Amino acid sequence: MKTTELVKRSNRLNKKLYIGKYAVLGFDVSFKFADVDEHEFDDFFAEMVAFVDSRDLIMGGAGGTQHFTIYISNYARYLSATEEDRGAFEQWLAGYEFISDSCVAPLSDAYYGV
C-alpha cells in the first residue's frame, strides 16, 4: 500500500493504518567503528541509549563491532521524531572519534518506509 494513494478512508482507519496526518516519522542511522575496544564499544552504546531515551525516542537496529545500522523514532504511539531530533543525534554521533562513515538519513515513514 502506498501512503500517497488518494483513497477516501475514515479518520479512524487512517489512524489505525498510521497514514496521512497520523503517519509516524523516524530516521535511519548507519555508521562504522574504527579501532574501538570492547570497553569503548560498551560505553558508547550505554551513552547512545541514554541520549535516545533523554529525547523520548526509541531505537532498534543490528550490527557488530565493525558496522551498525539503527532506526530511531518517537517513543509515543502517534508522535514522530523531528528534524531537531535528527540533527541532535547527528551532532552527538559526530562527537565520537572512533565513528566513521556515519550517515543520518532524512526523516521517513516508520511504518511504510516512504
Image: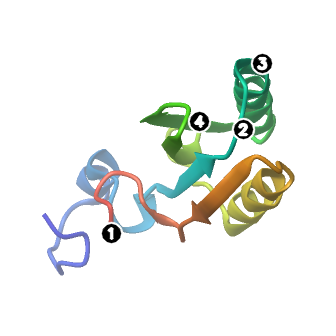
Distance, label 1 to label 4, CA atoms, is 19 Å
Assess whether mark 2 and mark 3 are in contact (beta carbons under 8 angstroms): no
Assess whether mark 2 and mark 4 are in contact (beta carbons under 8 angstroms): yes
56 w.r.t. 37: above or below: below
Q: Which mark is residue 58?
A: 4
Q: Which callout, 3 or 1, points at the residue further toward the start of the chain?
A: 3
Position of 79 compared to 10: left or right? right
> Which quadrant of the view contains residue 59?
top right
Can residue 77 be seen here? The reply is yes
Q: Which callout, 4 or 2, points at the residue further toward the start of the chain?
A: 2
Can residue 76 be seen here? The reply is no
Position of 111 compared to 62: left or right? left
From the viewer's perspective, is the residue at label 3 or at label 4 nearer?
Answer: 3
Judging depth in this view, the residue of 72 and 93 nearest the camera is 93
Q: Which callout, 3 or 2, points at the residue further toward the start of the chain?
A: 3
> According to the image, what is the colour scheme of the structure?
rainbow
Residue type at mark 2 is: Val
Rendered location of residue 41, percent (x, y): 70, 27
Residue type at mark 4 is: Ile
Distance, label 3 to label 1, CA atoms, is 37 Å
**Mark 1 Cα-neighbour bin, 10 Å: few <14, some 14–19, many ≥20:** few
23 w.r.t. 52: above or below: below
Judging depth in this view, the residue of 9 and 103 nearest the camera is 103
Q: What residue do we see at 70% from left, 39% from top?
A: 35
Rendered location of residue 47, percent (x, y): 80, 30
Q: Which mark is residue 114?
A: 1
Rendered location of residue 44, percent (x, y): 76, 31
Q: What residue do we see at 32% from left, 69% from top?
A: 114
Q: Which callout, 1 or 4, points at the residue further toward the start of the chain?
A: 4
Residue type at mark 1 is: Val
According to the image, label 3 marks what residue?
39
According to the image, label 2 marks what residue?
52
